[in-house]
Image (spheres, rainbow, N blue to C red):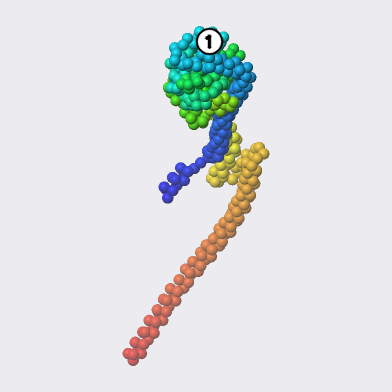
Amino acid sequence: MVMKVRKKRKMKTTIFRQLILNVIIPVVVALLVLGGLNYFNTQNLLVDSNHDKNEIITEELLHILEFQDVALEVLESSLDGEMANYSSQLINEHFNEVQNIESIDLDSLRRLIGINHQNVDIYVINRNGIVVNTTFERDLNLNFFSFGDEHKNLLLHVFDEEKFVSERFAIEATTKRLKKYTYQPTLNGKYIIELGVYSEQADEIINFIKNTLNGISKEQESIQSVELYIGADNPFSLTENIDLSENQKKVVIDIFKSKNDTSFISDHSGSMLNYDYFYMVRKNTDLYSDAVIKITSDRSSQRTYLRNELIKLLIVFGITIIAVIFLIYRKTRVITSPIKRLVTHVNKIAGGKFDERAQVEGNNEITKLSEHFNYMLEEIQKYYNELEEKVRERTQEVVQQKEEIEAQRDNLAEKNEHLEIAYQKIEEQNKHITDSIIYAKRIQTAI
């Protein structure tokens, strides 16, 4: 029994505790849910914003490259006839005998024909793809087959077709300048005479693309650089005059093969950099039919923004909880004070003080309870007084009856005493008579 009482005392609670449990916990849960939803919604908005921004940049670059192809196509139409004439002269008039083709002075031959030596270069390529003679000395002994399968297949196709082929403008791997190439095999089919022509108008177009890409990174604070890679087998950057590391080259080649977009995150000097790669298909070109866009962005500011939002959430959460607890505490005192006073009156009444009355104040449920409690006390006191009066009257009646009974008892006792005396006298007389009879019988017997 003692154990049960102790257990009940441990489970005893208060209105303040109940309000804390029933109000604070739902408020905490609601704030946490709302804060979490707001945090993740902000995070998703930033992710969507970055995704949309990358898509806009990709679309813009695609349109720029399409504009480049259209502009270069117009420019090429004016160069095709001139380049075909130069190629025909070289093949039919100067390289019809190929004994000295690998050692001939191409620079002098170029001046002889009247080819602009500043803008046009001549290449002699053997069947192994090796540049065996050229006016562009940096490319001498360069293996064009190493540029990738696309370039290799192009040269082999020229050997097979045995006719003049004019290729679209493309990026020269060595100088990163736009250059138009034409190909025509020699009459014996052992070499290809390649003409490469620069164009100032083409340079202006490629500079416009570079400036546009650099302008994107300047306009967008979070974007550090935008790079365009071309060449599926041996990729290089159109915008940066730097060689790709083996790791970077492997990533770009994998994207060219898979044709899928990919992203990486790396810690660089304390900043979290995002590297987003996007595969892009190019149209109206034969040599480089696809490209990869690399967007490098520093999203540290976004992470800082999310962290600040989380701190704000925690601050608002803490202030709200403190405010709610304070308000509940104040309201609890307003609610419980009349109840405590009412309990005090009840305890006094339980001790027999029926003249106690609850304090009536305010206009709420406690007020109604106090009014009804006082009414109940008045009724109880009325019943108690009536009962006390009845008990007093009944007690008086009992006392009176007791006195009457005692008087009757005394009267009976006195009568009993008289009867006892009379009885004793009768007994004595009876004894005398009996003795007389016995005596008479003895006399009679004696006679």
Image coordinates of residue 136 in percent, x first then y, are 49, 12
36 shown above or below 357: above
57 shown above or below 29: above
In this rendering, does residue 446 appear at all?
Answer: yes
Residue farthest to the right, as pictured: 363
Image coordinates of residue 216 in percent, x first then y, are 58, 19
**In front here: 351 or 23?**
23
Q: In which quarter of the view is residue 361 placed? A: top right
Amino acid, disc 1: Arg
**In front here: 338 or 433?**
338
Residue farthest to the bottom, as pictured: 447
Q: Mark 1 points at which residue?
A: 110
Image coordinates of residue 164 in percent, x first then y, are 55, 22
The answer to whether residue 270 is left or right of residue 41 is: left
- Quarter of the C terminus within the rendering: bottom left
Q: Measuring 52% from the left and 17% from the top, which residue is drawn there?
A: 91
Mark 1, Cα crowd under 10 Å, few <14 / some 14-19 / many 20+, is some
400 shown above or below 335: below
**In front here: 230 or 416?**
230
Q: Measuring 47% from the left and 28% from the top, which residue is drawn there?
A: 254
Residue farthest to the left, as pictured: 446
Q: Measuring 55% from the left and 25% from the top, which residue is drawn there?
A: 286
Q: Is label 1 in a helix, a strand or a loop?
A: helix
Q: Measuring 50% from the left and 20% from the top, which residue is drawn there?
A: 187
In this rendering, does residue 407 appear at all?
Answer: no
Image coordinates of residue 322 in percent, x first then y, are 55, 30
Give the total of numbered labels. 1
Q: In which quarter of the view is residue 102 placed? A: top left
**In front here: 291 or 295?**
291
